[in-house]
Amino acid sequence: MNNFLKKVFNSDGGSNKSRIPFRLNFIFIIVGILFAVLVAQLAVLQIINGNKYKAEVNRSDNATKLGNVQRGMIYDSAGRVLVGNKSHQAIQYTKALNVTSSELYNIANNLSKYISLDDIALTPGQKAEYYLANPVNLKAVSSKLTFAKNATPDDQYQKELEYVKNDKDIKFNKREKNAAAIFQKMSGAYQLSTTYIKSTGVTSRELAEVGEHLSEMPGVQVGDSWTRDYPNGSSIQSIIGTVSSEKAGLPSDKINSLLAQGYSRNDSVGQSYLEAKYEPVLRGSKSQTQVKISSENSSMSNMIKKYGGQKGDNLQLTINSQFQKKLQELVANADRGTGYSTGAYAVVMNPNTGAVIGLAGVDRNPSTGKETPNALGTINSGIVMGSVVKGATVSGALMDKVITPTNSVLVDKPIFGKSSWFNHGGSNDVAVDASTALEISSNSYMMQLAMKEGGYKPGGPLTSMSPSIFGTLRGYFNQFGLGVKTGIDLPGETTGFKGPSGINNLGKALDMSFGNYDSYTMMQVAQYMSTIANGGYRIQPHIVQNIRGTNKDGKMGPVKYSVTPNVLNKIDIKPSELAVVKKGLYNVVHGTNQFRTGMQLNEIKPEISAKTGTAQSFYNGKETVNLTLASYAPSDNPQVVVAVAIPNLPVDSESNNIVLAKQIYQAYWKYVQSSEDFK
């Protein structure tokens, strides 16, 4: 060691010890300075720019690719598939990080050799974008243009696009159009999101050729896609709703909120009704795959699946698909006479739970005779229902104490030019109580109840009645669900039509009392009759019964959530008062009065209680009638409510509503519940 120091610090080999400390100190200073510089540089890298470089490494080396999963299915009340997923082999593309337009151009041109897209529709702007993605074309176009000195690259590109769009000499052949369509699908994708280039109709030859050349087309893959399938028919597809196609992508009015939730622009999403309302349940969660991105060509490799994704949960509806199919058939074939008939509607509901077992509708264009299925008409079409609502009129009068269960007799007689169907000229004036008034459908009785509630002074003019009668009648009707939204779990429900009120329309209040003024939806009538049947509880109707998972075999799995009956309000009516109404509805079918209106229903077993209705209506100035009916069965233990309406029938129509109701009950006992259980 000493010899070594002598050689380093004493070139003449002497022992000049005074120079050694100086040289050692000098070296230590140099080393210290270099070490300080190194520490400073590390501080800059790790502390000041650490996050930046870390993000850059993660962004450029490793990233997460998201993959689509199957949408949840929809089942009927018996577990039959109403809406499934039909699998298709598909050609997909996952857009890498920092991929350039020219790279996309080359991939699209390559892929276009092996697949052909259907229904190609390109805008001039899309064609121009494809054309300029070729560097040769871009350079040639740019050389023909003059740009302002302060023009940004984006300004220049927009000018180049406009030039190509307006250049009529630039034409596209079939192959170029196909490549341009592929290019648009690729360029519209987000980085590391997977888009479908061709999701259906991929031929075996296309699959084979694409698979053989995958290495030449970074990001292109062979995979699966799914479209909605309806194995039990589409009779309630209007209620279930629709799902957007990958071509249509996200709805424009919701795109920003959906993108914020992790959707890609070309994802399928529920667009209407149940598909839209339960989108968070049905969509599932995307798979996540870690990929390594090549810095040379942005290709992806070393794919490691971190999360396999999860298929969307399933909906189980309250609707019985077999019964629903038959119900729609019965409504479509109901006797609607001729001329101005505008359709028919029916709702079948469990009065104790609010579960909708079936709902059907058909619209008819009187001008052309064309008919269109429209189950949604049961929640958004207002119809003047006629005498069907009289149960609510009597209930309101009992709650208002203008009559009582033991003191309710009034004389049926014409009033202010209005009369009951059996007493037009006053030749059948008869004293009736509340139950009998329902049995024979007395208009006069209902008008007298309204006059009593409105404070009418006997013998005086109608104007002695308070205009508040409109609010009084509607208030009681609302308690049963007439004139208000039922709360059904479907969007688009309406409240019907509310006619003008006030002192100048007091005569219309009399019409309202027997159902010939305001209009209501079919669902409201079903809820109203359910409220009577179950003892006074207005229950929210619902279509969805359960949210369920999926078993390993792909079939409907365990219940994750169940919809329970939701009581919206309890009618403030005493059991003795409600018994008066129920007795009247029973006697409509099973009474002994010669004027009872539902005697044709007495052959149905088990026994039913009902209220029929006939309302005067008009179509294009021509007089017509609406025939309606609301009922429940069995009378002593209600399990099902059936409500029907056939608007704008010929004026001489009589029993179309009763015939349809009888057919519906027969179908219900056959497909849903055995009538043998109630014998």
Image (cartoon, rainbow, N blue to C red):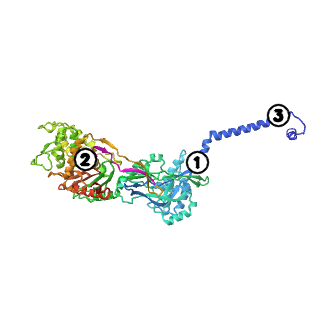
Q: Position of residue 217 (x, y in %)?
A: 56, 59
* Quadrant for the C terminus in the image: bottom left
Name the residue that disc number 1 marks.
59
Query: 10 Å neighbourhood of mark 1: few (<14), some, or many (≥20)?
Result: some
Contact (CB < 8 A) between labels 1 and 3?
Answer: no
Task: Give the CA distance from mark 1 to mark 3.
Answer: 51 Å
Q: Residue furthest bottom?
A: 205
Instruction: Indicate whether residue 9 is drawn in magenta.
Output: no
Name the residue that disc number 2 marks.
519
Mark 2 lies on a secondary structure that is loop
Looking at the picture, tell me which residue is in the foreground, 367 or 637. 637
Q: Label 3 is placed on what type of residue?
A: Phe
What range of the chain is rendered magenta?
532-550
Looking at the picture, tell me which residue is in the foreground, 379 or 188. 379
Tell me if 489 is positioned left or right of 16 in this view: left
- Sequence-first tag of 3 and 2: 3
Q: Residue furthest front?
A: 679
Mark 2 or mark 1: which is in front?
2
* Quadrant for the N terminus in the image: top right
Looking at the picture, tell me which residue is in the foreground, 552 or 105. 552
Looking at the picture, tell me which residue is in the foreground, 432 or 109. 432
Q: Is residue 59 visible?
A: yes
Tell me if 338 is positioned left or right of 552 in this view: left
